[in-house]
Amino acid sequence: MITVSYLTVFSAPKPFTNPPIAVIQRNAIQSWLGLGPDVEALLVGEEPGMAEVAAEYGVRLLTDVLRTDTGTPLVNSIFALARQASDSPFLAYVNGDILLLQDLLDATRQIASQVNGPFLLIGQRWDLDVLDLLDFSHGWEMRLRTDVQARGQLHRPAGSDYFVFPRSAFQEMPEFAIGRAGWDNWMIYHARQQGWPVIDGTPSVTIVHQSHDYSHLPGGRPHYDHQESQQNMAKAGGLANMYMVLDADRQLKDGRIQRPPLTITRLVRRIERALMPKDGSLRGTRGAVTRRFRRMRRKLYG
């Protein structure tokens, strides 16, 4: 009898040649496997060290991913490979440095029981400095939650590190470069444009990002500064389509999907989005006013 996992978690990790990055990614993979038999984990790519780690943890490895001219894996290819390799009704793309806890699976079940059709679950992450391999013996999740409460910091609602959706969603995507800015913003924009519920899981889901530097990127610079990030943004339709967690139109709280409260930050973001010129240009009078609201929004959430 073949057992179909309820949720397939897939990711395209970085090379395992950088020791701190290798530690972080090993921790992440073990946390995904720790969610139990209802969750399957897939790794996508052929980066150095990936095959060895996949074999060590018994995780399926999907190769032959399509790439940009500079060798960066393409998001649409990663998603297509994961969908083809899995029969799960729900898929979750997560970045390779993200620790997952049981509440992600709980949230997926709660949303699926209330939404009949496509949806997108996103949310803010908790940043945590992790230098060593974690202990995944009995009680690991409680220990991690305690550590997050003591040392973690909630990341501003501008970044997205996980996306949960039914397998029928996101079957067609632009050829974005993974690990660069822009594609994650497009995910939220596209879902909103399709009329799917975009659900902020921050009140219910603890997503832990293991902090790291950018030494794995060319020049050690943040991905925002790279040409492929600019190309991603152009393929997404420009600055006007750079949506974020603040643009979610629903929230999961206490097991129920509801409208998010209209906080000052969300109100400022709505005004900013309404003022944003369609071409994403911040020139002229309207662009100047938009920039002012962008600065105001950033000050509100730090």
Image: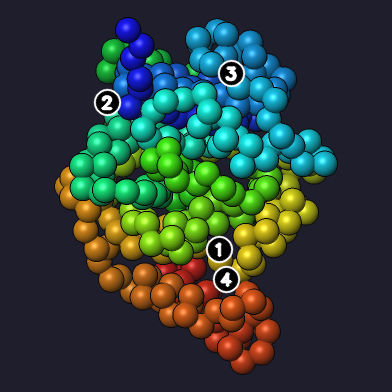
Where residue 45 sits: x, y (%)?
Answer: 66, 26
> Disc 1 versus disc 3: distance between alpha carbons?
31 Å
Q: How many marks?
A: 4
Amino acid under disc 2:
Met
Query: Is 178 displayed left or right of 271 in the figure?
Result: right
**Where, quadrant-wise, is the N terminus in this rendering?**
top left
Q: Which residue is mark 3?
A: 61
Does 2 appear above or below 235?
above
> Disc 2 versus disc 1: distance between alpha carbons?
35 Å
Q: Is residue 147 visible?
A: no
Please name which of the two marks, 2 or 1, marks the residue nearer to the observer: 1
Q: Which residue is mark 2?
A: 142
**Callout 3 secondary element:** strand
Where residue 179 sits: x, y (%)?
Answer: 64, 42
Please name which of the two marks, 4 or 2, marks the residue nearer to the observer: 4
Please name which of the two marks, 1 or 3, marks the residue nearer to the observer: 3
Q: Residues within 10 Å of mark 2 (few under 14, many from 20)?
A: few
**Callout 4 secondary element:** helix
**Callout 2 secondary element:** helix
> Disc 3 versus disc 4: distance between alpha carbons?
36 Å
Q: Which residue is mark 4?
A: 240
Q: Residue at x 72, y 58 (%)?
A: 230
User: Residues at badges 1 and 4 in contact (C-beta under 8 Å)?
Assistant: yes
Residue 178 location, quadrant: top right
